[in-house]
Image: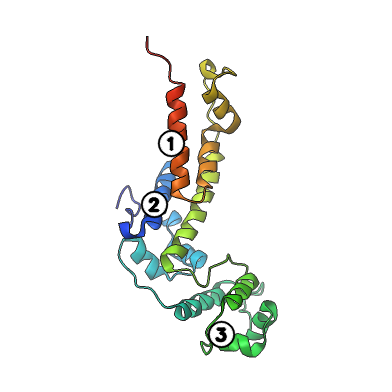
Amino acid sequence: MTDGFPAPVAVANAPLAATVTRVAELANKLGRARNQVFDLRRLSEASGVPADVIKTLLDGRPAGEPDLQARFLQRLDLLRRTRVKPNGRRYTQQEIADGAGMSRQQAGALINGDRRPTMEHCDAIQRFFGVHAGFLTAHDADALTDALQRTEQQLLQDFAGRERQPVPAETASAGDPLARLLQNHGVRGIAWRAAQLPSDKHRDKVTEWLDMLLESVKPNES
């Protein structure tokens, strides 16, 4: 554990480890409590991964991996329990069938595990419940990483919503590329844009470019 947040998970799961680290650092900067940011129940509902598996993954331990059908049934059951009708009742098999464009028999066979789902079945059910693509099929670590990346985006939005840092007057020259960058985007805006890039490799490129820019505008030593 570090500063009340989970330590990076096993290196074998590098994307998850990197995401956990970034989220923990942002949460610390914003003064958010660990149980708020890494709430197991919320992450389970967002990812479809059971809370006990999430805890195991965050602790850096292997959690095993169910096969595709077991994963599908597990997450479909979670959807039916957590994405309910306005009156609080679960959707019936007939309502799921109608919403997903399949027969009641097809829906019943999928829900009861009597038929293996196709990608078309998964896509239709995901659309019906209003969840993102891959919710029913992604591997546990990938699904958790995706949920944490959405948490990271929200934290970055909150961070960017704070009062923008003023650009020092002495660097506000229109000819100063660093000043123009800060004026156009702000420090938090730059961080927000970088976080939207699809991979750590792309974010590393932004860091490399910023380092080069800072080096190029460094005042000459007398």
Within 10 Å of disc 3 (Cα), the crowding (few <14, some 14-19, many 20+) is: many
Look at label 3 and name its amino acid. Leu
Pointer 2 or 3: first along the chain: 2
Is residue 67 in sight in this rendering?
Answer: yes
Note whether 159 is above or below 9 in the view shown. Answer: above
Is residue 32 in sight in this rendering?
Answer: no
Within 10 Å of disc 2 (Cα), the crowding (few <14, some 14-19, many 20+) is: some
Within 10 Å of disc 1 (Cα), the crowding (few <14, some 14-19, many 20+) is: few
Find residue 18 and name its label.
2
SS type, badge 3: helix
Look at label 2 and name its amino acid. Ala
The residue where tag 1 is placed is 208
Find residue 102 and name its label.
none
Identify the residue at image location x=33%, y=51%. 4
SS type, badge 1: helix
Look at label 1 and name its amino acid. Glu
Pinpoint residue 44: horizontal percent, then vertical percent: 47, 67
Identify the residue at image location x=52%, y=78%. 77
The residue where tag 3 is placed is 110
Identify the residue at image location x=58%, y=33%. 185
Pinpoint residue 49: horizontal percent, then vertical percent: 45, 69
Pointer 3 or 1: first along the chain: 3
Pointer 2 or 1: first along the chain: 2
What separation in Å lies between label 2 and label 3 (alpha carbons)? 35 Å
Note whether 5 is above or below 214 in the view shown. Answer: below
SS type, badge 2: helix
